[in-house]
C-alpha cells in the first residue's frame, strides 16, 4: 500500500476531531485508561455502558448493550455447563460390580448409565484450561467495535475498535456415593479463575480509550446429582443398563463476577447403554433449566431492551458415546458427541461438540483420564477446543 494522500489524511484528522467532540459531548466524558472495572468484561459490561462510565452517547449504548448483556449471560452459563462435562462423570461400578462392565472404563464427558455400587465412593479432580475466541459467530477481538454514520464524510465509519480476550482455568472436585446398588448420589464443586483483558480505542490515529486487565476467581455453581437404575441385564454377553437422574444447581456462583449463574438450575436426564463386545455405547437425553439471571434491559437514559431473556439458555441436550475397551480393565478410549438445542428464538439455536477421551487404570483404585472437545459451530461462547485432564480415586 502506498503513502497516504494529503486529502485522506486531512479527512482522517477531521474525523478524529469529530470523534473527540462526540466523546467529550457525552455525559460524564472521561478516558477510561487505568480505570478499575466491576467485572472481567471491563468497559464492555452492559450495566457499565449504560451507567455513563464509558462516556458513550445513547446511540452507541443502544448498539453495544445487547451484545454486552448476551456475553455476560453466556459466560455465566458456559462456566456452569462446563463444570458438569468436565467433572469426569464419576459414575462407575465399585469393586463388587466391575464384573458387569467387563473391563470397559466408560466415557468421560458423558455420564455412563451404570451406578457405582452400594457403599462405594469415587472422588475425582479435573483441570480444564479455558481460552474463548468467539461468541455467536463473532470473534471476541472485534465484538465491541462500533460504527455510525458520520455527516462529515457522508458514510458509515468505524468509530471505536475493540479487542477482548477471555481465558482462565476451571478446576472441578467431584464425587459419587452408592446408597444402594442402583441408587447413587453425587456432587460437582467447581472453582474457576477467569481473566478478561483488552483495549478500546478510537479507530483513527489509534488513540486509546481503555486498556484493561481484570481477574476474578472463586467457587462457581455447585451441582448436586442423583441417579437411579430402572433396568439392568447382568448377563455378561448382553449387558444393558437404563437409568434416570437429576441435577440441582445451587446458587453458589458469583454472577456479578461472572463465576457462574448465581441462581438455581435443574436438569432431568435419562441414560441407556448396552454392551457389544469390547464397546459399551451410551446415549443420554436431558432437559436443562439453566437458571441464568440475564440483563433484560438497561437505562441510558431511556430504557434499552437487550433482547436477552432468562430462559434463553434452557436447553434440550442429546449426548452419545462409544467407549472402546482397548486393554481389558486397563485402558478405554471413547468417541463422544455433545449437543444442545437452546430455547431462545435466535436462528443459531444448536451447539454441538465432538470429543475424544481416554481412561487409564494405574492402580486398582486410581485412574487417570482426560479428553478434548472440538466445537462444530460458533453458537454461544467457544474456543478452538476444550481439553480436560485429571484423576480419580475409588474406595
Image (cartoon, rainbow, N blue to C red):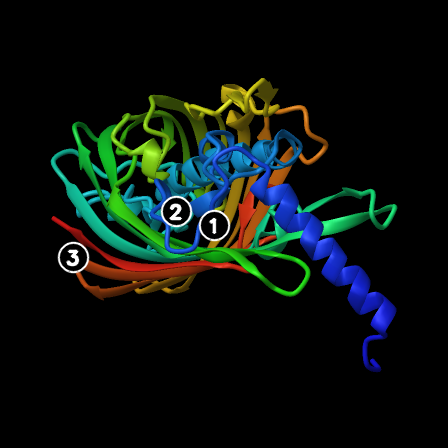
Q: Nearer the viewer, residue 143 or 2?
A: 2
Neighbour class for label 3 at 10 Å: few (<14), some, many (≥20)?
few
On the image, the x and y values in percent for residue 136 come to 63, 43
Residue 64, given in percent of the width and then of the height, sits at 61, 37
Q: What is the secondary structure assignment of the residue under circle 3?
A: loop
Residue 159 in picture, x, y percent from top left:
68, 50
| Mark 2 Cα shell of 10 Å, populated few (<14), some (14-19), many (≥20) | many
Is residue 357 in sight in this rendering? no
The picture quadrant where one finds residue 304 is top right
Q: Nearer the viewer, mark 1 or mark 2?
A: 1
In front: 236, or 142?
142
Q: Position of residue 264 (x, y in %)?
A: 33, 21
Mark 3–mark 1 distance (CA, rounded to whole Å): 58 Å
- Write down the residue under mark 1: 31
Label located before the other in sequence (3 or 1): 1
In depth, the one of 69 and 116 nearer the eye is 69
Q: Quadrant of the N terminus?
A: bottom right
Q: Is residue 321 visible?
A: yes
Residue shown at 39% from the left, 51% from the top: 108
**Label 3, on which residue?**
365
User: Of marks 1 and 2, which one's residue comes earlier in the chain?
Assistant: 1
Quarter where residue 271 is shown:
top left
Side of 49 relative to 146 (left or right)? left
Q: CA distance from mark 1 to mark 2?
A: 19 Å
SS of the residue under disc 1: loop
Q: Identify the residue at horizontal 60%, vertical 47% (top origin).
A: 144
Looking at the image, residue 213 sits to the left or right of residue 22; the answer is left
Please state if 50 lies on the left or on the right of 240 as rendered.
right
Q: Earlier in the sequence, mark 3 or mark 2?
A: 2
Q: Which residue is mark 2?
A: 40
Q: Residue at x 61, y 64 (%)?
A: 206
Amino acid at each position: 500500500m502506498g503513502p497516504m494522500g494529503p486529502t485522506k489524511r486531512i479527512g482522517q484528522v477531521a474525523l478524529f476531531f469529530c470523534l473527540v467532540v462526540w466523546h467529550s459531548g457525552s455525559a460524564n466524558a472521561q478516558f477510561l485508561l487505568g480505570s478499575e472495572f466491576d467485572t472481567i468484561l471491563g468497559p464492555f459490561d452492559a450495566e457499565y455502558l449504560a451507567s455513563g462510565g464509558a462516556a458513550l452517547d445513547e446511540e452507541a449504548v443502544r448498539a453495544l448493550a445487547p451484545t454486552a448483556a448476551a456475553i455476560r449471560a453466556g459466560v455465566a452459563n458456559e462456566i456452569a455447563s462446563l463444570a458438569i462435562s468436565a467433572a469426569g462423570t464419576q459414575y462407575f461400578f465399585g469393586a463388587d460390580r466391575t464384573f458387569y462392565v467387563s473391563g470397559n472404563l466408560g466415557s468421560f464427558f458423558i455420564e455412563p448409565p451404570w451406578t457405582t455400587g452400594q457403599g462405594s465412593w469415587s472422588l475425582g479432580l479435573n483441570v480444564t484450561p479455558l481460552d474463548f475466541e468467539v461468541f455467536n459467530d463473532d470473534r471476541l477481538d472485534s465484538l465491541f467495535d462500533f460504527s455510525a454514520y458520520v455527516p462529515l464524510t457522508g458514510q458509515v465509519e468505524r468509530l471505536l475498535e475493540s479487542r477482548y480476550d477471555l481465558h482462565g482455568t476451571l478446576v472441578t472436585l467431584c464425587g459419587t456415593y452408592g446408597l444402594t446398588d442402583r441408587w447413587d448420589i453425587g456432587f460437582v464443586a467447581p472453582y474457576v479463575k477467569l481473566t478478561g483483558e483488552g483495549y478500546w480505542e478510537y479507530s483513527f490515529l489509534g488513540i486509546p480509550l481503555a486498556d484493561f486487565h481484570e481477574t476474578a476467581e472463586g467457587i462457581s455453581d455447585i451441582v448436586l446429582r442423583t441417579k437411579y437404575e430402572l433396568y439392568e441385564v447382568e448377563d455378561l454377553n448382553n449387558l444393558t443398563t437404563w437409568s434416570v437422574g437429576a441435577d440441582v444447581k445451587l446458587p453458589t456462583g458469583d454472577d456479578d463476577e461472572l463465576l457462574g449463574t448465581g441462581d438455581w438450575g435443574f436438569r432431568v436426564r435419562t441414560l441407556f447403554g448396552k454392551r457389544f463386545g469390547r464397546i459399551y455405547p451410551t446415549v443420554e437425553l436431558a432437559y436443562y433449566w439453566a437458571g441464568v439471571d440475564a440483563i433484560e434491559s438497561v437505562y441510558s437514559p431511556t430504557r434499552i431492551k437487550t433482547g436477552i431473556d432468562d430462559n434463553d439458555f434452557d436447553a434440550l441436550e442429546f449426548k452419545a458415546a462409544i467407549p472402546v475397551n482397548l486393554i481389558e480393565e486397563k485402558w478405554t478410549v471413547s468417541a463422544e458427541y455433545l449437543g444442545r438445542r437452546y430455547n431462545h428464538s435466535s436462528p443459531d439455536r444448536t451447539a454441538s461438540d465432538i470429543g475424544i477421551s481416554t481412561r487409564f487404570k494405574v492402580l486398582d483404585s486410581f485412574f487417570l483420564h482426560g479428553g478434548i472437545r472440538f466445537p462444530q459451530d460458533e453458537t454461544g461462547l467457544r474456543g478452538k477446543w476444550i481439553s480436560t485432564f485429571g484423576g480419580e480415586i475409588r474406595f
